[in-house]
Image (tube, rainbow, N blue to C red):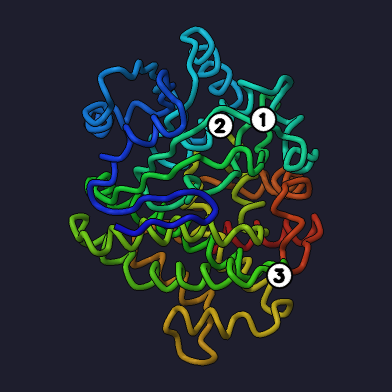
């Protein structure tokens, strides 16, 4: 079992959930709120977690996490937290449940609307101590279990990023066994989310060589193991490496993210469409790679090396083809995004936290062009 502290304590291996009791005790949690969703409960994963909890731990469950977590859901979960005098959080599920858990921790100790604490409003430096959070991912994509960031749809319909070192889970329990039953489509979509994190983080202009190196290692794992995990969900080696790649993607985005995420956040804020974040990243990644190509120096050379591509290979074309082999949508149009949405989407991007770290910061007009390209494919 590998034990990694970067930037939090992480246990990764098959059977890792057995350390949950010790993790709760180490952090003084006896009355946790479990933030999860109904799919996790129905799948039997929730029962596995209950099975390793000590008898003296009193659990409250919030299982209404939406696919893109909302401020309303955060408030509902917070009400349960307070009603039951909870003293910590277990975030169980994909990135949505883990992000929701972070937002509950924030609002349990900080007053005001979520947007007051967003990164663009200075939240990164002003968020204080929050209740302890133990994160248990059930997908291999967002890497939210090892990061201090969370993305929440506010009550006014915007997708905002909150982030602070004080929101990093006290421990990430990464048990690849929890991903063995993940359907092919979700395996593919969440895996491409990890790829987008590794690539975008590596390409930002922020100088952080350890994070950059981790991003390249994560990218190599995705290219090597994602298709295997999609083709055979019981491939334990592939599942282990994809879980590691997901966490590495989040470690890498200590360097920040870019326009892929600005654009996917804009579309993902639409609560009627409810599009999957990882799928959006997968479809948008080739378009943004082409936009950034003349503004990244020799970074694409290192990306090709990590991906095992020939010198001069077109990375954007390779990812487009890879998406097809994973049976993901070919373009945004297939996902229901239409041209009449473009102006509002582009406007949303201009205030997104990820916008400001793209290698070339796009104008609103340039976002409109990229959305049009993404719709057409």
Disc 2 + disc 1, Cβ < 8 Å = yes
At horizontal 43% and vertical 57% (from top left) the residue drawn is 4
Disc 2 target residue: 271
**Residue bearing mark 1:** 157
Q: Nearer the viewer, mark 1 or mark 3?
A: 3
Q: How many marks?
A: 3
Mark earlier in primary sequence (1, 3): 1
- Badge 3: residue crowd in 10 Å (few <14, some 14–19, many ≥20): few
Residue pushed farthest top? 83
| Whole-percent x, y for residue 265 in the image | 62, 45
Identify the image quadrant of the N terminus. Answer: bottom left
Who comes first in sequence, dot 3 or dot 2? 3
Is residue 107 among what the camera can see?
A: yes
Label 1, residues with CA under 10 Å away: few <14, some 14-19, many ≥20 = some
In the foreground, 199 or 213: 213
User: Percent x, y for residue 138?
Assistant: 34, 43
- Mark 2 and mark 1 lie on one chain; the one further toward the N terminus is 1
Label 3: which residue? 207
Q: Point out residue 162 in the picture as x, y percentages from the top left corner.
A: 66, 39
């Amino acid at each position: 079992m590998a034990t990694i502290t970067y930037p939090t304590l992480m246990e990764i291996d098959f059977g890792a959930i057995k350390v949950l009791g010790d993790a709760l005790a180490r952090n003084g949690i006896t009355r946790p709120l479990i933030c999860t969703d109904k799919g996790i409960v129905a799948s039997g994963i929730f029962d596995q977690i209950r099975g390793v909890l000590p008898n003296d731990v009193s659990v409250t469950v919030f299982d209404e996490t939406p696919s893109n977590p909302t401020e309303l859901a955060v408030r509902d979960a917070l009400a349960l937290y307070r009603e039951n005098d909870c003293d910590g959080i277990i975030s169980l599920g994909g990135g949505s449940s883990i992000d929701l858990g972070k937002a509950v921790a924030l609002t349990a100790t900080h007053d005001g609307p979520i947007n007051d604490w967003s990164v663009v409003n200075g939240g990164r430096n002003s968020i204080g101590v929050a209740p302890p959070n133990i994160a248990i991912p059930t997908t291999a994509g967002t890497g939210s279990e090892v990061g201090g960031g969370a993305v929440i749809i506010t009550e006014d319909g915007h997708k905002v990023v909150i982030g602070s070192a004080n929101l990093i889970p006290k421990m990430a329990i990464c048990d690849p066994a929890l991903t063995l039953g993940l359907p092919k489509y979700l395996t593919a979509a969440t895996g491409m989310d990890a790829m987008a994190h590794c690539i975008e983080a590596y390409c930002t202009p922020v100088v952080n060589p350890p994070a950059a190196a981790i991003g390249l290692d994560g990218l190599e794992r995705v290219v090597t193991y994602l298709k295997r995990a999609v083709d055979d969900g019981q491939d334990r080696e592939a599942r282990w490496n994809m879980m590691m790649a997901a966490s590495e993607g989040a470690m890498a985005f200590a360097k920040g993210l870019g326009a892929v995420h600005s654009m996917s956040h804009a579309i993902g804020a639409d609560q009627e469409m409810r599009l999957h974040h990882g799928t959006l990243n997968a479809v948008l990644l080739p378009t943004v790679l082409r936009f950034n190509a003349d503004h990244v120096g020799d970074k694409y050379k290192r990306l090709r090396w990590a991906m095992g591509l020939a010198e001069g290979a077109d990375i954007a074309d390779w990812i487009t083809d890879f998406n097809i082999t994973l049976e993901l949508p070919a373009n945004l149009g297939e996902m229901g995004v239409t041209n009449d949405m473009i102006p509002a989407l582009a406007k949303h991007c201009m205030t997104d936290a990820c916008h400001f770290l793209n290698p070339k910061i796009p104008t609103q007009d340039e976002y409109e062009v990229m959305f049009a390209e993404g719709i057409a494919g």
